[in-house]
Image (tube, coloured by chain):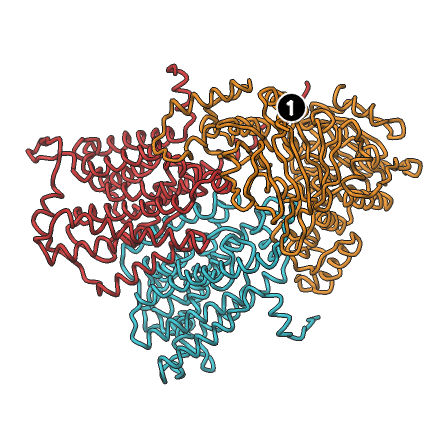
Chain colours: A orange, B red, C cyan
Amino acid sequence: MSDTFLEMKHISKLYAGVQALDDVSFSLTRGEIHCLVGENGSGKSTLIKVISGVVNPEQGAEIIIEGQRLSIDHFSSKDSIDRGIHVIYQDLSLFPNLTVRENISFNVHVERGKKLVNWRDINAIAKGAIGDIGIDIELEREVGTLSIADQQLVAICKALIGELKLLIMDEPTSSLTKNEVDSLFSVVKKLQKRGITTLFVSHKLNEILEIAERVTVLRDGKCVGVYDPDELDHEKLTYLMTGKKIEYIKPDTSSISREVLLEVRNLSKKGNFKNISFKLYRGEILGITGLLGSGRTELALAIFGINPAEKGQIVIDGKAVSIKSNKDAIHQGIGYVPEDRLELGLVMPQSVSNNIIITVLQDLLNSLSMLDKEKRNSAIQRGIRELAIRVPSVDSAVMTLSGGNQQRVVLAKWISTGPKILILDEPTVGIDVAAKSSIHHIIKQLAAQGIGIIFISDEIQETLYNCHRILVMRKGRIVSESQTSEMTEEKLFQIVNVG
Amino acid sequence: MEISEFARRLLKRNEIYLLFVIIALAIMLSLFNPNFMTLENLFDILRSYSFMGILAVGVLTVLLSGGIDISFTANATVAQYVMAYLLVNNPEMNIFLAVLIPCSIGIALGFINASLIYYLNAPPIIITISTLNVYFGVLQFISGGKWLYNFPVWFRNFSKLTVIKLVNPEGIPYGLSILTIIWIAIVLITFFILKYTTLGRKIYAMGGNNEAAKRSGLNILKLQMFVYCFMGLLAGIASIIQALLAQTVAPNAIMGRELEVIAAVVLGGASLAGGRGSLIGTLLGVSLIAVVSNGLTLMRVSSYWQKVFIGLIIIISVSITALQRKAVARRVAAVDVEE
Amino acid sequence: MWKSERFNIQEWFRRNRELATLPFVLVAVFALMSILASGRFLRGSNFQSMAFQLPEVGLFSLAMMIALLTGGLNLSVITTANLSSIVAALILKTCCVPGDTGPMVTLIIILAIAVALATSLVLGLINGILIAHVGVSAILATLGTMTLYDGLAIAITKGYVISDFPKSFLFIGNGTIAGVPIALLIFIVTAYLMSLILSRKPYGVSVYMIGSNEKATEFSGVNIKRVLMKSYLLSGFLSGIASVIMTSRFNSANAGYGASYLLVTVLIAVLGGVDPFGGFGKVSGLVMALVILQFISSGLNLLGVTAFVTISMWGTILIMVMGLNNYLEKRRLKIIRRDFSA
C-alpha cells in the first residue's frame, strides 16, 4: 500500500443537474505511467479537476495522497501544487512574452514573500531543470517563438521546479510529430526513473499501447474499468468508451466512376511540398495521411488557394485552372473544411444561420440586391435538414453546439455552395467516437452524390475505413499510393511511421 | 556574452531602428539649424518633455499589464488643480503637503479605475474613457473653469533649479533641470521595479497570458491595483511638473493630450495587447516626438504643422511594424521538404 | 417585390434580448425628465431643439459603430468631419458672400457639399488602406490619421474659425420641413439605410462575421480587404454627412470642434448594444441609446446643469451599463452552465 501514490474513492460531482462524476474510484501507484481515456462528457476533465484541487467532489468522497487522507472541502489548487501535483493543460499556460528561463522558473516568483528577483538564481534553476531532463532549448528565447513541442517541454521543466510527484498532461500529443512524441515519451520515462508518477489523458491507441502501464476508462461519469494496455485494441477501446459496437467496413470501390474530377500535376512550393501529382475521381474519397509536418495541410491549402503553389498545374474537369486565392478555388467548386474548427472553421460567437450562409451570400439576393428572406431561410433550413444538425434555434451561437454538430455546420456551409470537390482536413478531430462515425456516414453520402473528397487524417483506422484510395505523404512528397482494398492497418502504419 | 553576440541580439530589437531614426533626424536637423545639437537645447527639450515622459512611463506600465488607461490626463488635471488651489490660497503651505496631495489624489483616482475594471469585468478602455469624463466633468463643475496662478515664490524658484551648471556663449546660465532629474529618477525606479522585482515580472506575465497568470496563482486584483495606482501616482507627479513648467494651472491645460502620450509609448514598441514593451522604447518614442517637434520649431516650421508631422510619423511607424510582421509570417516554412 | 412582415413585438424581444432593456430605459428617462424639468421638457420647443442636436451625434455614432462592428475602432471620425467641413467652408467662402442668393450660389453650395463628402471618402479611404491592406490595427491606424487630419485642419485654418455662409446653405442645418428639422430627416434616412445595409446586404453579414473572427470568415471565401475598406469608407462618409450638417448648423467650420464627441459616440454605441470587441450591434439599439442620451442631455440642460456635469453623467452611465451587463452575464452563465468538458 505504500506504493500507492493516490487513491480516490466514491468521487461524485454534480453540476447544475448533470452528473459529471458518479461514484468513481481511481488509484495511481507511485512512478507509474497511467492513461485516462474517455469521451467528451465522460468526466475525465472533471476528474482531473478534482485531483488538482480546482473543484471539490461531493460529500462522501475519499482522497488519500501518499497515505494521508485529505479533507475534501479544504483541498485547493494551491494545496494540490504543494503536494507535488502539477497539471499541464492543452494550452500549456506559459507566458509567450517571457523567456524560456523565466517561464521555467516562474513559480519562484510566486513563492510567498519574495519581492526581489535574483536573476542568477532564476538562470541556475532553469539550467538545472533542462539538464535534468536532458533537453536542448535556448534559455534566452521567448517562449512564444518556440514550436508547440518545445513549449510542452518547457511546461514539463516548469512542473519539475518544486517537488514534482504527479504530472498530469491533458492530450499532450495532439499537435506533435512522431519524433516529438518520442522525445516526450523518453522524457516521461526519465521522470519515471525518478519516481514521478505520470497521468495523461489521451485517446490515441498506439500511443497508449506504447507508453501506458495501466488504462482507466470513463464513460458517462462512471468508471468502466482499469485495463492492461495489452488487453486493448481499437474495437475494444471504442466499445468501452462508447458502450456501442461500431462496425468498420472498408468502402466499396467498385462503384467509383472513372471520370477524373481533379488532377494535380507536379505541384510544388518551396518549404511546403514538392512534385505532387495525383488524380481524384468523381465520387471518390481519396485519403491523404502521413505524420504531422508532412505537408498535407499545406497541399490542401494550395488547392484551396490560400497558400498557392509556385509550380505545377491544377486541372479540374479537364480544364487547367489558375488558383491564386481561395475565391478562385471556391469559384472552381472547391470547398475546404479546416482542421482547426474553433478558429478557422467557424465563427464561434455568431449564429448557426450566419455560419451556414456565409459562403453563398451572393446566391440569396432578390431583384434589389438585398438578401431575400425566403431564400435565406430555405438555404438555412436545407443545411440543417441535409446535415441533420441538432440545434434549438438557428440563431443560437455556434459555440453552444457539440463538436459533432459544429462540424455538421461547417459541412452544411460548404455543401450549400454545390461543390465539386471537398477537402476535409482532420474532419473528426476532437469529436466523440459515436459522433465521428455519423460524420463518416455523411462524408460517404456526399461522395455517393458525386462529390470528389480529399480526406486528410492522422488516424490509420479512420483513413482505411473511409477512403477508396490512400496517398501517404512524407516530408512534402507523396511516397505511396494504394487502393484501400490492398491495404491493411499494419502495412499502412509501417509506411507512415517507418517508411 | 561576446561582443558579436551582443551586437547581433541588439540589432534584433526594434528599439535600435527607432534610435537610428532619431539619430538620423537629429543629424539632419542640426544641419538645418546648428542650434539644435547644442547641450543647451538638449537640456531644454528634456525639461519640457519631462511631463510627457513621466506620463509615458505610467502608460507603459499599464500597457504591459494588458490594460490601458486613457483617464490619466483627467487624473493629472484634478490632482494638479487641487494642489494649485491650496497652494495659491495658502502660500505658507508645507512643501511636503504640496507634493503629497496631488500624489494621493492620483493614486486614489487610479484606485477607482482599477476597482471598476476588476469588479465590473469591463474592458479597461471603456472604463477609463468613462472615468476620464467623470473626473474632468466633476473638476470643471467644482472649479468653474477658473485659471490659477500666483504661486508662492519657492514654487517658481524650484522650477528653475538646475544641476550641472553651465554658461552659454551669450553668458546666460543653463543646466540640466531638476524636473528632468525627477523624470530620470522615475525611469530608474520603474526600471528597477519592472526588471528586478517579482511584482514587475508578474505584470509582464499577466500581460502576456492572463489565463495562465490566474492559473499560476497570481493575484490579478493586486497587480491591477498596483498598475493603475502607479499610473495615478505618476499622473500626480507629472501634474506637479506641469504646474512648475507653466506656472499657471488651467483645468483644460492637460486634457486632450492622452492620445499623444499613448502614441509615444506605442511608437516605442509597446503592444496594446499587453506583455510587450520596454522603458528604453518608451523613452525613444518620447524622444522621437520631442526631436520632431523641437526640430520643426527650430526650422521655423509653423507650429500649426507639428501635428501633421506627428501624425505622419505615427502612420509610417505603425505601417512599418505591420508590414514587418506580415513578412515574418510569410517566411515561416512549415515543412522540412525532402529535396 | 417587397415582402412585408407583420411586426411581432414578442418576436422582436426574443431576437433582441440584449436590447430589451433599452425601451424601458427610454420610457423611464423620458418620464423622469418630464417630471424633473416640469413643464419645459414636454414643450414643443424642447423637442425641436433636441431634434436639431441629435442628428450630428447620431451620425458620428453610426460612423463609430461601423468600425466597432468589424472589431476595430475609428478614432478619426470627428477630425474627418472637421477637415471635410473646412474644405467645404473654404469653397463657400471663396466663391460667395453671405448675402448671396440665386442659382449660382445654389450650384456652389452643391459643389461644396459634394467636395465635403468626397473629402470624407478620401480620408476614409486612407484609413481603409492602412487597416485593410497594410494590416495596421484599427486603433493605431486611426490614432495616426486622427492626428494627421487634425494637424491638417489646424495647418489650413491656422486656428481661425471660418464662418458666415450663404443663407441657403444654413437651411440644411437649421431648416425644417413640416416642422421636422431637415437634419433629423437626413439622419433618419441614413440610419434606416444603414440598418438595411447591415441586416439585408451580404456586406452586412460579412461585417458581423469579420468582427467576431476575421480569419475564419476569410477561409469561408469572404474578401476581407474589400469589406474592411468599404467599412472605413462608409464610416468616413457618415462623418462627411455629419460635417455638412454641422457646418450649416453652426454657420462655421474650425479644427477643434467636437473633440469631446469622440467618447460620447463610443458610449452611445456601447449603450446601444454594440459589442466593443466586434461582431454584434444593431442600429435600432444605437438609435434608442442616442435618444436616451439626448433626453438626459436636454433635461439636464433645462434644469440648469452645466455641460460638465452632463459629461460626467455620460461617464457614470457608461460605467453603470458595464456593471449591469456584467451582472446579467454572470446570471446568464449560471443558468446555462453545463460543464461541457466533463
Relative to C132, say whether B192 is above or below: above
In the drawing, does residue A430 fall left or right of residue A101? right
Q: Quadrant of the C terminus of chain B?
A: top right
In this rendering, does residue B138 appear at all? Answer: yes
The residue under label 1 is: A185
Q: Amino acid at mark 1?
A: Phe
Give me the residue at 41% from left, 33% from top.
Answer: A109
x and y, in percent, of residue B146 in the image: 19, 62
x and y, in percent, of residue A58 in the image: 61, 49
- Which of the 4 image quadrants contains residue A388? bottom right
In this rendering, does residue C134 appear at all? Answer: no
Give me the residue at 85% from left, 44% from top.
Answer: A450
Relative to B250, say whether C299 is above or below: below
| Disc 1: host chain | A
Q: Nearer the viewer, residue C321 or C219?
A: C321
- Which of the 4 image quadrants contains residue A443? top right
Q: Assign a secondary structure to mark 1.
A: helix
Give me the residue at 22% from left, 37% from top.
Answer: B46
Q: Quadrant of the N terminus of chain B?
A: top left
x and y, in percent, of residue B309 in the image: 33, 43
Give me the residue at 7% from left, 35% from top.
Answer: B172
x and y, in percent, of residue A332 in the image: 75, 43
In the drawing, does residue C106 fall left or right of residue A197? left
In the drawing, does residue C291 fall left or right of residue B152? right
